[in-house]
Amino acid sequence: MTTGSARLIYVYDPMCSWCWGYKPAWLALQQQLNEQIPSLKIDYRLGGLAPDSDAAMPQDMQQFLSQTWHKISAQLGTEFNHAFWQECQPRRSTYPACRACLIAREFGLEQAMILAIQQAYYLQAKNPSDIDTLIYTAVSIGMDGHAFKTRLLSTELNQKFITELQTVHQLPIRGFPSLVLEVNGQAVGIPLDYTNPQTSFDAIVKAID
């Protein structure tokens, strides 16, 4: 199978709970693609779930997201530390965590950063809307905390992030996570299955052929 210039784009937000739930299926899909279609390029792109905000998350939104965690756990067996809702002051703000992933990408550490943020958020009841938590995750994957913070707060990084959002929002996506295959100059939405990665694999093979 020749993929030519085909590439698969994984659109995500590091603080999207469904992305955390999808993680096992996504890892399995990547492994299958690497083994059976090794020439297919896989890129990660940020979707940006919630803009910068210092405001406390409204109580009804907290309740909705808490229920979503329980729903994902029941459906997929995903582990969550529900103490987050008692121990942290939630904010509806994922852009800082997205920028952290963008910095990590520059060092080839994007996937490590995603996992570090997800583990801090969902397992350790830390708040990735807070810069201190993001510095913690950066240091945990071997980055320099001071340099990371300087870059995180820079205008240049924010502009780079905005540019990525503008590009991503032109893709055929429906929320996060999403998979898009770019092949023969066309962007094709790939169905995403949280329990059976074969569904996406078959759709990718069909689109490439």
Image: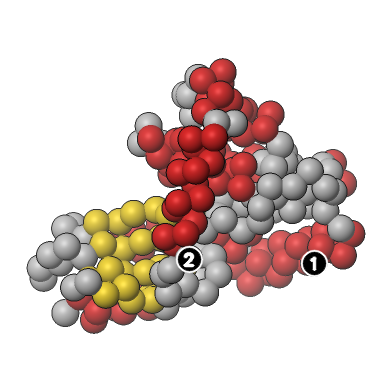
Disc 2: which residue? 169
Q: Residue visible at 86% across and 58% down?
A: 58
Q: Residue 200 falls in which quadrant of the image?
A: bottom left
Q: Relative to 15, is 54 on the left or the right? A: right
Q: Nearer the viewer, residue 12 or 31?
A: 12
Q: Amino acid at mark 2?
A: His
Which is in the foreground here, disc 2 or disc 1?
2
Q: Relative to 26, is 206 on the left or the right? A: left
Residue 107 shows in this picture: yes
Query: What is the residue that sits farthest to the left in this orientation?
Result: 2
Disc 1: which residue? 64
Q: Relative to 59, is 184 on the left or the right? A: left
Q: Relative to 32, is 107 on the left or the right? A: right
Q: Residue 39: x and y, percent?
A: 16, 58
Q: Residue 103: x and y, percent?
A: 46, 35
Query: The N terminus lies in which quarter of the figure?
Result: bottom left
Q: Amino acid at mark 1?
A: Phe
Tags 2 and 1 touching, CB below 8 Å: no
Compare marks 2 and 1 and give the one earlier in the sequence: 1
Colouring convention used in this rendered image of the protein? secondary structure
Q: Residue 142: x and y, percent?
A: 47, 24
In this view, 45 is above or below 29: above
Q: Residue visible at 76% across and 62% down?
A: 65
Q: Residue visible at 24% across and 56% down?
A: 41
Q: Residue visible at 21% across and 60% down?
A: 40
Query: The C terminus lies in which quarter of the figure?
Result: bottom left
Secondary element at tag 1: helix
Distance (Cα) linking label 2 and label 1: 25 Å
In this view, 138 is above or below 127: above
How packed mark 1 is, by other alpha carbons closer than 10 Å (few <14, some 14-19, many 20 or more), is: few
Q: Residue 26 falls in which quadrant of the image?
A: bottom left
